[in-house]
Image: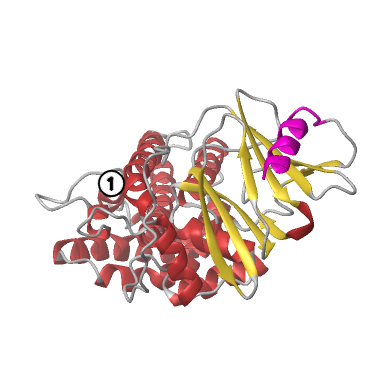
Amino acid sequence: MIKMRIYLIILLFLTSAPLVKTIGKVSLVKEVANTALSLFTTIMDLFELSTEKNELEQLTVEISEIKQILKTGLNSFLVRLDKSTYQNTLTGYINKVDSCEIDYLNYVVSPSDASKKNLVKCSDIIESVRPLGKYLSGSRIFDGPLLFDLYKDSNGVCNGSAMESIFKTLFAEYAIGCTIATTIERIEHSENASLYANECKDTMFKIVDYVKSLYQNCAPPACRNFHCSVQNIFSRYPPGSPDDLHANLSEMYPWFNFLIFEFSEGGETILGGNFFVRHDDDHMLKGSKYDIYFFDGDIQITTERQNYSLAIQISQNLLISYSFGNSTMTSVFYNGLPYGTFLGFAAKNNSLCNNKNLKDNRECYISTSNIFFLNPTLLVIISFILVN
């Protein structure tokens, strides 16, 4: 152990040595398989660009395709709402958008006077779009609870996978409603009309801010129980690789980023640098040992030198595989040495689960609840997306 720490200190200062290479994502996956925040920001950028060019048709078609993928699991999540008011209200708004979406796509395919007339009948669609935006940005329905409070257990632990599914699906509905409302406004008034477009852009920013705030509140209750949640994954849905585990954890805990290592038995990691990350280990599967580091999902680890450094020294000869998600790190491996180091940097330090005195709960039992797990259909969909 002492030798390993000495190697770590030495390697922190030798980033220009031979055999240095950048580690990161091999390829981009489809945006729908990423986090809700990533999907939202992508759609926001495309919506702004499309409205400026008055070319909303292709964006609507693409979001419609995304929505069909996401909507597979929506009904099961809506049924779980214990307040019928939300079920009825959300269903009404969604049905309105879906109906007008058909008219809009018919107009795009065949822009005749008849198809335009049918589309303009949806001029009141904004009355369904606005409430969706309000619920997604944290407003209540009448005197009921916040929509996403319904996806927390009695201890305040959030069901991240359910929240991600609801957020993504409702945001897709909202974005399509915005493109339709903007198009009709421009048909009825002028090509430069932008009242609804500006309103939607402002609301989209509010939604992103709300999601960030909500997930910051969801993170602390998850810190102490993280180890047992991972143990449940290994028992119920054994990962085939670090990438599989990364996908599952990212869906369960969208407020975290993950660095995952798989070793042969005896492999270990040693943490260095001034960037704080939470470490979880002791997960065994078919002779492999998994080490997991997690931190604030809003922070990206990159190879660019910044204020905070992260060094993770590993048992080089026992490393099987790893998964860093959107993070990129530089590997420093030396021929003939048993240890290697991954180096990365961040602009700010992690503030989630950074209480070093907080002991993880290691007295685990196999849960029969699905609160932390994906709908099996969604698991198949996401797996398909990642593979393709």
Extent of the magenta region: 1-15
Classify residue 12 by image quadrant: top right
Seen as rendered, the residue at the extreme top is 307
Q: Which secondary structure class fits the magenta region best?
A: helix
- Magenta stretch containing residue 223, yes or no? no
Q: Residue 368: x, y in percent?
A: 33, 76
Label 1: which secondary element: helix
- Give x and y (percent) for residue 1: 67, 45
Q: Indicate whether residue 2 is drawn in magenta.
A: yes
Position in image of residue 358 (x %, y %): 36, 43
Label 1 belongs to which residue?
130
The kind of residue on which mark 1 rests is: Arg
Q: Nearer the viewer, residue 195 or 290?
A: 290
Seen in the image, is 380 located left or right of residue 86? right
**Quadrant assignment, res 347:** top right
Where residue 147 sits, quadrant-wise, is bottom left
The reply to whether residue 25 is in sight is yes
